[in-house]
Amino acid sequence: MSHRVDRDIDKIYPRQEFVAKLRRLADALETEKRFEISIGGERIRVPAGAVASIEHERGGDEEEIEFQLRWRNEAAGDENASGR
């Protein structure tokens, strides 16, 4: 059984690479297909049913917009269901 370690990575991409990733994401969302992306050396598989949201933060002299996809980790759900 693989153990998933908590992580929080913020990766900056060149503009063209970022745009290409957004296009792939938009295509996957539009066609209701799974989206795969590699971030910080780990392959992430986002299921088709992931919930999409947009977050806006403001503080001091900075503002931030985050496009988020959220889903339940199936492996964690299996462990919880088995009582571990």
Image: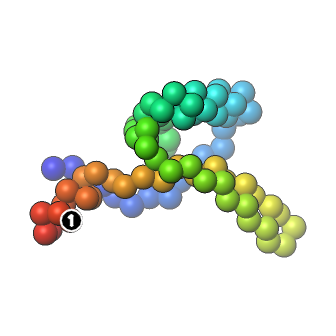
Q: Determine which quarter of the picture holds residue 30.
A: top right
| Image position of 11 (left or right of 35) | right
Percent from the top left, x then y, of residue 44? Answer: 42, 40
- Residue positioned most to the right: 61
Task: Say which residue appears at 49% left-offset and 43% top-offset.
Answer: 40
Compared to residue 61, the image places residue 31 above or below, namely above
Disc 1 residue type (three-letter): Asn
Applied colour scheme: rainbow
Compared to residue 35, the image places residue 73 above or below, namely below
Percent from the top left, x then y, of residue 35? Answer: 47, 34
Q: Determine which quarter of the picture holds residue 42.
A: top left
Q: Residues within 10 Å of mark 1 (few under 14, many from 20)?
A: few
In the foreground, 43 or 53: 53
In the foreground, 52 or 2: 52
Task: Say which residue appears at 72% left-offset and 27% top-offset.
Answer: 16
In the rendered image, which quarter contains the C terminus?
bottom left
| Image position of 49 (left or right of 61) | left
In the foreground, 20 or 10: 20
Look at the image and tell me whether residue 17 can be seen: no
Compared to residue 45, the image places residue 56 above or below, namely below
Q: Which residue is mark 1?
A: 80
